[in-house]
Each structure stands twice: as C-alpha cells, then as structure tokens.
Image (cartoon, rainbow, N blue to C red):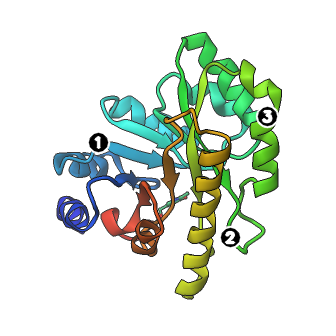
Amino acid sequence: MNIAKNIIELRSQIPPRVQVVAISKTKTVAEIQEAKSAGQILFGESKVQELIAKQKQIPESKWHFIGHLQTNKVKQIVPFVSMIQSVDSFRLLKEIDSQAAKYNRVIDCLLQIHIAREETKFGLSEQETVEMLQNNELLNLNYVRICGLMGIATFTEDIDVIRNEFRGLSSFFQRLRNELFIDTPSFNELSMGMSDDYTIAIEEGATIVRIGSSIFGKR
Ligand SMILES: *Cc1c(COP(=O)(O)O)cnc(C)c1O
C-alpha cells in the first residue's frame, strides 16, 4: 500500500469543497505519519483508547471521533478533539457540553442519523432529531456547536439502496437547515460516504467523506 500516493490520487478525484477525513482505526502511527507526509491533516478514529494513544504521539493532527461514544468516556477526548461526528443521543450531547465547559472549548458536533437497514447501527431517527433540536434545554448548551449530520449507509452492493439513503439524509439536512437553522450558518456539514460509496455520497451532497481502506488498505 502506498498511502501517500493513495491520498494524492483521492484528492485529485474529490472536489476541493469536500473534506476528506482519513479513517486511521487499527492503523499504526507510522502509517498515519505517511499520510501526513502527503498533506493529510485530518484523521478519524472510532475508539476512545486508540484515539488517545495516537493523539499523544501525533498531537499536531486534527482528530474527529466517528464511533459510538459512551458518555463516561467523553471527558477523555474533549480536551483535544476537533469534531465529534457521532452524537446519537441528547444525553451524550449534554455530557459533551458539560465536559467541554471545563476546558472552555466549544466542540463541533454532528448528529448521527440512522439511515441504514441494519438495526445494529447507531443513530437517531428523523423524529428523535427534530424533537431534540426543538427541546428548549438545547439553548442552555453553550459548549457544543451542532454543525450538521452524519450517516452510514447500508452495507450492500446495491447502489440504488445506498443512493436512496444518502439522498434521504441530504434532504433531511436541507430541511433542518431551512426550518431550524436558517440563522445558523455553521450548520453546514453533511458527513456521508466511505471508501466504497464516497462518489455517490458526493453526488448527493456530502461535504465530508470518511475514507479508511482506500487510503490505508484493508483492515
Ligand atoms: C471505519 C469507518 C469508516 C471508513 O470505512 P472504509 O470503508 O474503510 O473507508 C467510515 N466511517 C465510519 C463511521 C467508520 O467506522
């Protein structure tokens, strides 16, 4: 695997307005350093312990958390994380806010929406999301900034299924933007698309793609 070459190729195919998060889970610090040598600054991890270990060794990188986050682990990543993409409950959002307050940091967050057919995947339903966004308690949270939505499509070869899921997420995102965030320009990120489906995701309006194996090779 030539990691640096993969990044340069990928970047040449992806419009500059789309951010690429290099998903480095299970990969070594040396592999991450190789990606950095090709100009990649932004990395994503899905496990707290792994993220912390790597961040200590490469503190100058930017780190997004993309996995299921238990509330009792929030305090470990809040001092340094640049975005939490996987907020899947109001309880979690409130815990991020209260931990971030201690550091006087405002944490950028995405709400993870359940769009896949698999029940096992995490995420909020559209209804839960709207309820949460209309909850007055949200007004008391000064240390989180809700920047948009994240979704993971069904694991399938059927590209029509994937496209429909991304399209649905994109239209929900637009609807929230128009109805609830019209005065909040920072609500502008839509994270969808991984190695096998990022092209479709970009066509459907992704502003952030999360790419692991196409950069680092199989896990
Ligand atoms: C692992 C992971 C990715 C990257 O998957 P690839 O198929 O290797 O690109 C993207 N998003 C999430 C949430 C992940 O857990």
Is the CB of the residue bearing disc 3 within 8 angstroms of ligand 1? no
Q: Can the viewer see residue 148?
A: yes
Disc 1 designates what residue? 41
Sequence order check: which comes first, mark 1 or mark 3?
Answer: 1
Q: Nearer the viewer, residue 10 or 59?
A: 10
Q: Residue at x 63, y 68 (%)?
A: 168
Instruction: Determine whether the residue tagged by mark 3 lies in a helix, strand or loop.
Output: helix
Q: Position of residue 58 (x, y in %)?
A: 32, 34
Instruction: Write down the quadrant of residue 103 in the picture.
Output: top right
Disc 3 designates what residue? 91
Disc 3 to disc 2, C-alpha distance = 22 Å
Q: Residue at x 57, y 70 (%)?
A: 167
128 lies left or right of 113: right
Sequence order check: which comes first, mark 1 or mark 2?
Answer: 1
Disc 2 designates what residue? 116
Is 16 located above or below residue 72 in the figure? below
Q: Are marks 1 and 3 in contact (CB under 8 Å)?
A: no
